[in-house]
């Protein structure tokens, strides 16, 4: 009998939005994705024995961003115009926005599609780098 257990290693990396703003993005495991899908899925029973599942895209996006974003550097109010749906800014553009739960929640709730795509591509890049590193290790062993 093999006496071993799977160990989850959290993989993170910094990705530049522009010259000033960078986001720390966390790789999402299969387990993470399963939890996100479960929270975003509504099951409806139409007839006995017949059910349909429907994914709420907004819930999926919010849960995905919440799990993937673990920090940022250089966020200013002027960046909100780029990463959020149209909003009215009540601060000077150069005022910095610190990373905290409240600021993260605002961005997640108001994100635009371009920002969601940016985060999803970052998560996929972390996976690709991990797979490439595994291949190199296998070749060298």
Image: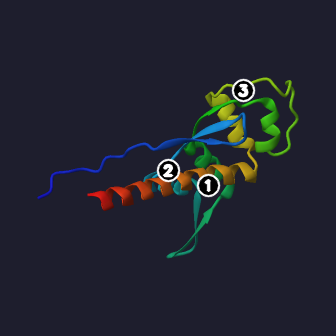
Residue 36, image x and y in percent?
54, 52
Asked which secondary structure carries label 3, the reply is loop
* Quadrant of the image occupied by residue 70: top right
Residue 44, image x and y in percent?
59, 66
Crowdedness near tag 1: few (<14), some (14–19) or many (≥20) residues, C-alpha within 10 Å: few
Residue 141, image x and y in percent?
26, 58
Residue 128, image x and y in percent?
50, 57
Name the residue tied to disc 1. 121
In this rendering, would 99 be left or right of 36? Answer: right
Give the distance between the C-alpha atoms of the residues marked 2 and 1, in whole angstroms: 12 Å
Q: Closer to us: mark 2 or mark 1? A: 1
In this rendering, would 3 be left or right of 50? Answer: left
Dots 3 and 2: beta carbons under 8 Å? no
Dots 3 and 1: beta carbons under 8 Å? no
Disc 3 or 2, which lies upstream in sequence?
2
Asked which secondary structure carries label 1, the reply is helix
Q: Residue furthest left?
A: 1
Q: Which mark is residue 77?
A: none
In this rendering, would 88 be left or right of 126? Answer: right
Up/down of 64 relative to 74, above or below: below
* Quadrant of the image occupied by residue 137: bottom left
In this rendering, would 89 be left or right of 97? Answer: right
Identify the image quadrant of the N terminus: bottom left
Name the residue tied to disc 3. 97
Name the residue tied to disc 2. 28
């Amino acid at each position: 009998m093999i006496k071993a257990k799977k160990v989850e290693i959290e993989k993170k990396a910094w990705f530049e939005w522009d010259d000033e703003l960078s986001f720390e993005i966390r790789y999402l495991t299969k387990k993470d994705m399963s939890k996100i899908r479960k929270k975003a899925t509504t099951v409806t029973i139409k007839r006995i024995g017949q059910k349909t599942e429907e994914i709420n895209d907004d819930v999926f996006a919010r849960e995905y961003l919440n799990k993937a974003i673990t920090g940022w550097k250089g966020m200013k109010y002027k960046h909100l115009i780029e990463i959020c749906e149209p909003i009215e800014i009540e601060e000077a553009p150069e005022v910095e926005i610190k990373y905290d739960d409240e600021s993260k929640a605002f961005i997640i709730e108001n994100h635009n599609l371009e920002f969601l795509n940016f985060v999803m591509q970052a998560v996929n890049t972390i996976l690709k780098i991990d797979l490439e590193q595994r291949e190199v290790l296998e070749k060298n062993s």
